[in-house]
Amino acid sequence: NAAEKGGYDHYMLKEIHEQPTALRQALSGRVNLDDGTADLDLEFPPGFLESLEEIQLIACGTSYYAAQYAAGLLESVADVRASAQLASEYTFNGGRDPWRTLTVAVTQSGETADTLSALRRANGAGVRTLAVTNTLGSTVTREANDSLFIRAGPEIGVAATKTFASQVTTLALLSIFVARERGTLSAADARSALADLRGLPGAVQQVLDEAETVREAAETYVDASAYFFVGRTYGYPVALEGALKLKEIAYDHAEGFAAGELKHGPLALVTDETPLLAVLTEGTRPAETLNNVAEAQTRGSPAIGIVDGTVETNALDVTFEVPSLGTATPLVANVYLQLFAYYIADLQGRPIDKPRNLAKSVTVE
Ligand code: G6P
């Protein structure tokens, strides 16, 4: 009912607007700016993190894109081979070095069958496992060696929104934690990364204050035949997540691409009826992406960019602004894509909180 939705038309919109609070909860008590550390209350066996050679993140759906974002962060700050793997495609027999591997199951519900089955394979191979979840007492917390909670609060909308933000933020803290234990990140660099994370709730609030301009853009583009999303590095999983949101709730064709891959195929799909949404902020190699956007514009594609002033973006049809927060900036950009998907779906009268054929938690493989 209306009261439960806190005055919003849908749980999804309410949950999008809850992100500043969710992020404050994810960060609460975990940011130690004095020491330049993340206080995560995680205990690994002595020497385990220092000798770690590989981190495998396993997940499905939106959690997989959060995992992809996190794998990039882990590679860059913790100097460890890190990969995001679709739980439904995960095969691991412990062949490489199970004692120097950490497998992280990223799952909002803690009950996704594909993720649990992959986790069991990792456990069976003798790998140390960590659950990153929103749900206390969920199956994943009982089966993994350790648990780290994202503290987003309950999410009702089938399309994950605030939990994506909380997952990326919590995993960013984990990357700093691991990096500091391994000695691969200086206290000064850790402080700066932590300060960026601290800036997230306020930056996300600034985006939410622009919701009306996103609704206007959605009105302009609601009749498009398809929507394409592009980004590089941390902007790439955000592009994939933006496309997933739109297809889930609006039932329109939407696809995310690595920006550099546009010219290797997808450009053939581009017309004046296919708006391109591009992440063009810090942490996404925006100058290169802008070249790819220009190629699509030449073929008539309207271009919507999420920008932070890092590159000159006068040629875009629509720009949405975010403050720069280092590698956390694309996470802020993602909030524009959530709002865009929401308004495109709402203008078409879709049942946003319960899209056809989808479930909040999928408990079959
Ligand atoms: C379902 C939901 C998605 C979610 C995915 C993984 O498909 O509809 O929103 O991202 O499951 O869920 P999990 O609980 O494992 O994060």
Image (cartoon, helix red, strand yellow):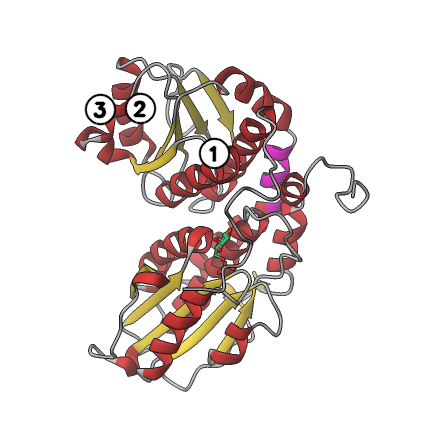
- Residue tagged 1: 251
Badge nearest the viewer, 1 or 3: 1
User: Quarter holding the N terminus?
Assistant: top right
Reading the image, the residue beneath label 2 is 293
Mark-to-mark CA distance, 1 and 3: 22 Å
Q: Is mark 3 within 8 Å of ligand 1?
A: no
Q: First in sequence, mark 2 or 1: give its number.
A: 1
Q: Is residue 301 above or below residue 329?
A: above
State whether label 2 is within 8 Å of ligand 1. no
Number of labels in the image equals 3
With 2 as the anchor, is 197 left or right in this view?
left
The CA distance from mark 2 to mark 3 is 14 Å
Frontmost of labels 2 and 1 is: 1
Question: Could you tell me the amino acid type at mark 2?
Answer: Val
Which tag, 2 or 3, sits closer to the chain's start? Answer: 3
Q: Give the range drawn in magenta.
A: 201-208
Identify the residue position indicated by label 3 in the image: 268
Label 2 close to label 3 by CB (< 8 Å): no
Q: Residue at x 47, y 46 (%)?
A: 328
Where residue 130 sits: x, y (%)?
Answer: 45, 73
Q: Which secondary structure class fits the magenta region best? A: helix
* For residue 159, above or below residue 96: above
Q: Which of marks 2 and 3 is in front?
A: 3
